[in-house]
Amino acid sequence: MITGLGVVSAVGCGVTDFWDSLIEGKDGTKRVTVFDPSPYPVKIAAEVDCLDPEDHFSKKEIRRLSRCDQFGLVAFREAWRSARLDQEKIKPERVGVVLGAGSGGILSVEKYFRKFYQGSKRPRPSLLIPYSLATTTDLIAIEAGLKGPRSTTATVCSSSSVSIGVAYEMIQMGLADVMVSGGSDSLCEVSFSGFNSLKLIDPESCKPFDKRRKGLVIGEGAGILILERLEYALKREAPIQAELLGYGICADAYHLTSPEPNGEGVERVIRTALVHAGVSPEEVDTINAHGTATPFNDIAETRGIKKVFGERAKDIPVSGIKSMIGHCLGSTGGIEAVATVLTLKNGRIPPTIHYEAPDPECDLDYVPNQSIRKEVKIAISNSFAFGGNNCCLVFKKFEK
Amino acid sequence: MEPRIVITGLGIVSPIGIGKEEFWRNCLLGTSGIKPIQRFEVTPYRSQLGAELPPVDFKRFIKPVNLRRMDRIGKIVTSSVKLALDDSGIAIREEDSNRMGISIGTGLGSSDTVDQFFRSLLKEGPMGAQPLLFQTAVPNAITSHCSIEYGIKGVNLTFSHKETSTEMAIAFAYHLLKQGRADVILAGGGDELSEPLYHVYHMLGALSPGGTKGSEGMRPFDKTRNGIVLGEGSGIVVLETQEHAERRGARIYAEMRGVGLSGSTDGLLKYDLKGDSIGEAISLAVEDLSMVDYISAAANSTVDLDRAESRAIQKVFGKTAKEIPVSSLKSMIGEFDGSGGIRACALALSLYEGVIPPTIETREIDPHCDLNVILGKPQKREMRSALLNACASGGSNISLWFSRYHPMGL
């Protein structure tokens, strides 16, 4: 059961603003300010601008927290509050944290090494504290005194989806009653220039499934979900947002950066997830796509979806919300899981914006430009990482 | 009924040996992998030592076409995967690739590649950024290299959580096998000793200092211990369901029996100071404490951890704590986030051959670490079961429980 949700994104901080923006079709793309983008051919990203660290942290804390840590902590606090969890009432050993990471604190580490390599003033060592990808996970656990299972997944684009699957297992295997999962990530020059160098970035906007698409718009943020064992949630009368039925994780085993082009990896991971969830393809009402708007992903994903759902595929609304929030790398699985839960809860499906020129090879219903009202019971969320590390989550609307 | 999970292959790339035979021979000789660092300049630092890998001809293990795409840590881990697969005798072509999985842990992954990439950015600007470097720089590139090299299409995990990275990879693989999500999972991982990583550890005050600051070295449980010496390497265990292993007539080193996961909250750079959380992980992993005949310790020559782990062992095992042989392999291979893969391999060998490697360099045990630490020479001992502890600064603790394998169960 999912009992708590927290989110920080380029289109809004907090679940309410985030959801309103998604439904409105708001575009989170803006000029990068976190570092100087002028040397880059592309100067845009889905940067978070709704969070002022001084509203949430003391000056001393800000010196030691990376941008990724800050997003994670803010989203966690919202999720914890929305789940109505009480630090006094939980058994700390039964509450754990498994998050997904992308670049983690690299932005802070870059600041340090820029100064170090350019031989200017002595850079401050506290910038190196977030060197490990475990940092945000540990900070959240330490803040709330959580002593249960603790780890961090690191498959970048599918990281925080995988973390949700791992958290699910921790509960299923009786190792915890409550698990904090999802993930956080921030813009940094290494990611920004890396994707640029691979020519996977669209200089204008993110246009999933559109014929004119050129690639990603890099995003950042945090999406945190609190998972709970059903009996535990019912006993403490927790607010239940949705149910996590199951997940699938598998590999393309194809190429370091390109997906297997016929959607074979996509098909396998969706099927694995559905089998695990005990759901047949006929029952799936909507899909939160990975939809990165790279030429390859969108075709592979479309093909994979068709292989699973056959003729019915054309009737399943497929949302590409990266068109609004960007590709949030390590946090994208978590943020998109939050969006998927809200879709089920609110009976509305967010759009794929910037959709103007249909691609004959991508001919599904991508909910173009306008959200739609639809009662949906079962939704899946796809996340496919570099190197073909694929993950699919299956959610169900909670009905009392 | 849940399947029993066994270890059928070991792959080791370590500072004291490449491959199981060389590694184990050196373990039992008490060979130290710790020497002055050669691969990069350490004169600016007060610490000079590290346990570096000997030169390795990676072509022995990896096809040239894939080798070209890998960075050093990718080569190290993929080589250990190859060694493990060969050791297990699994005929990959005859297996269902969807039922084979891979689960890798790495604390700092491609730290060197990321650094190289960043430096080229600084030097040449964005137009000089090299895409081939970037695609290997992500932490899951290592796992991807392995899955592509061997066509492994099943479950695919990468964990990165400091000193419990590889133990989590092994623990989660165990859970997935128990759930029937796979028949075979290659689990473990590693880390490399890169120059930027060394710099960070130094700046954060983690390294054992030399010169005027004291005696530099790796001395777990020793009264004069003052910090870690970094090492590098990778270890992979082939985890398999008992049924799958028996059906193909596999040699079985040991059985994996249990996992304990916990977290302490003493601080971002702090271990579990009181040892309560470590004790919790041990208690969760071990069903029958009286069966534990050896503990492969997390102790890493830091004042805090060695003491906390000792407290935990004393608290959990009570009166029998002083009898249980304890040893820290890190005294030979150094401390690194991804050491758990090698340590798990070594523990499987200990159970299989009935011998415990020594903790070297340690001379005088700290009275606060009042345990039966095996010093100097290996100890022959028929063991029923053994425990592997892993403790991360920041608080993650994992204990893995293994037993000697018996077809009828122990």
Image (cartoon, helix red, strand yellow):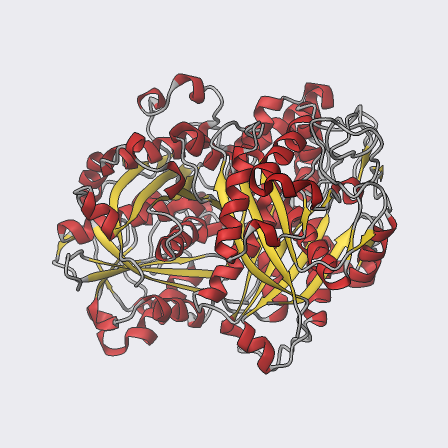
Q: Position of residue B186 (x, y in %)?
A: 35, 42
Q: The C terminus of chain B lies in which quarter of the figure?
A: bottom left
Instruction: Using the rendered view, name the quadrant where residue B89 is placed.
Output: top left
Relative side of A244 to A82, left or right = left
Q: Position of residue B255 (x, y in %)?
A: 24, 55
Relative side of A373 to B197, left or right = right
Instruction: Using the rendered view, name the quadrant where residue A260 is placed.
Output: top right
Q: The N terminus of chain B lies in which quarter of the figure?
A: bottom left
Q: Position of residue A364 (x, y in %)?
A: 71, 37
Residue at the spot x=50%, y=40% of the render?
Answer: A268
Q: Is residue A302 above or below residue A315?
A: above
Q: Nearer the viewer, residue B25 or B30?
A: B25
Relative side of B50 to B130, left or right = left
Relative side of A256 to B286, left or right = right
Q: Position of residue B312 (x, y in %)?
A: 36, 70
Q: Residue furthest top?
A: B64
Q: Is residue A187 above or below residue B149?
A: below
Instruction: Using the rendered view, name the quadrant where residue B333 is placed.
Output: top left
Q: Is residue A340 visible?
A: yes
